Amino acid sequence: MIDFKDITYNYSHQSGVYNIDLKIKKDEFCFLVGPTGSGKTTLLKLLYFDLFPHKGKVEILKYSSANIKKSSIHKVRKKIGVVFQDYKLLKQRTVYENIALPLHINGVGRKKIKQLVNEALDLTELSHYSKKFPNELSGGEQQRVCIARAIVKNPDVILADEPTGNLDPTTGHRILKILEQINKEGTCVVMATHNYKLISDKAYRIIELNEGKVVSG
Amino acid sequence: MIDKIAFLFVEGIKNFTRNKLANFICIITILINFTILGTFFVFGYNTDNIVNFFRSKYTFEVFLNSDTNLDQAVTLKNEFLDNTLISSVDLIGKEESAKIFYDEFGEDIIQILGYNPLPMSLKVNLHDKGFDSEEVNLLIEKYGSNSFVDEIVYQGSYVDNIESRINLFIFIFLVLVLLLIFISIQIIGNTTSLSMSNRKDFIEILRYNGASNLFIKTPFLIEAFLQSLVGSLLAFLLVKYGFVIINSYLGVNIKIDDYLWAWMIVLSLIVSSYASSKSMKRILL
């Protein structure tokens, strides 16, 4: 499902990822761990084609960085749900509207949107907040909205970039629980985190990065 | 698909109502530019009428020799009336000439001189349709040498001058039209850029959620369309009713093309789609 083949990506300030070879299977839940600047976010950005490798190639859901056209990137992204550390929610839209956005993009009908958004709201325990605006919510609640938006389109892969980074431990565990539940339903989840404590008791695959290289995993 | 189109349309309208100041400035600019453009169109449409208006004022005056009698003058008048270029001929007798002299100079020439030295004359009015200045010149040349004729005064050279400059007017008109279209493109393009910059986060979120460039562009395109539609519609109303007022106050008959509204709106939509697409292409590289 996900295949990094000898990937190198350099930023101008001499950081990035180097010679990464990784495979992640369908239905897998794995953590990308490592200190700040170790290359976790870079790997995720390479997966949703926000960045393109300088060497090697990334393959995800039958799309390859080697030959994907710029005009086709949106097709991959339709199948990927991305959860951001800074949530990236639309402040002038309600929770409901934020979650419905990917469905509008996918051309889903109004009735179906209502049904799917309500399911996502239930799963993330946000049903009571559907008419609220993001700035009326706590950090944890906003992160759950971000997760609901990522899962509502029933993606094949969820990429979560430090989803618990700004949250207290209890809320962090709650977010992780939601992601585990999504994975149990068959969605591949790749979660970047530097919070070792949060994942220490989990039996999932852990890919450890340091200075842009895979240390273990 | 219908839901998707409805969503994009609503987004376009939301954009339009959200960026009030930028849209207001843009609409005012389109209004001014298209009012000027519409006025040019009306003048262009009425070029023939305007030239004919001047032509209708064309007459030439044939001053007869002082020894020409009334019968000879009437014969000459009838000769003129047989010519297809001429619509009517007024015979101005000696007494009437003296009256005209009095009206113009305030002096009674008969009282001053003791006799009337003014000759009879023919005021020849030309047809404005099918006017051909060369034929008129030939006609004047022909009668200039007539034994009853002393002098022919013809002011048609002014009209010839206007007609010969009409190509220059059309050239200036086209340059101004292009200049106004260029200004409109710049203003609409800048408003679209501004609108997109203000909504950078929205565009980024749409992209991460799988929106194609077309999906992202559509609401901004609708916003630009609405600016053009409102601006050009107001401009049309201003031009139309402006000329209605001018016609009624000046007693002229400036005609307005029945499809002027369509020309103005279609042109503004073409301008706005080109300007906004160009500007979006730059931003959505």
Image (tube, helix red, strand yellow):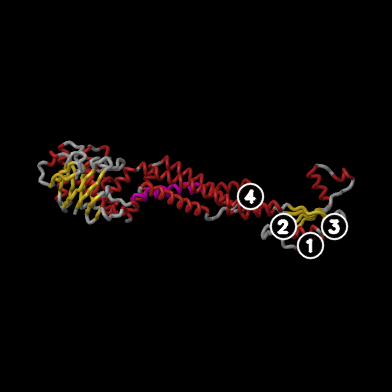
Name the residue at 28% across, 52% down.
A73
Q: State the separation of the CA atoms marked 2 and 3.
A: 23 Å
- Element on which disc 1 rests: helix
Chain to which the residue tagged by mark 3 belongs: B
The residue at which mark 2 appears reads as B126
Report which residue position mark 1 lands on: B79
Residue A133 position by quadrant: top left
Q: Amino acid at mark 2?
A: Leu
Q: Are marks 4 and 3 in contact (CB under 8 Å)?
A: no
Distance from disc 2 to disc 4, alpha carbons, whole Å, reads: 20 Å
* Residue A102 belongs to magenta span: no
Dot 2 and dot 4 residues touching (CB under 8 Å): no
Query: Could you tell me if the residues under marks 1 and 2 are in contact, i.e. CB atoms within 8 Å?
Result: no
Q: Earlier in the sequence, mark 2 or mark 4?
A: 2
Up the image or down, B89 lies above or below B186; here it is: below
Q: Residue B252 location, x and y as percent? A: 63, 50
Q: Is residue B218 magenta?
A: yes
Q: Which residue is mark 3?
A: B70
Quick one: SS at disc 2? strand
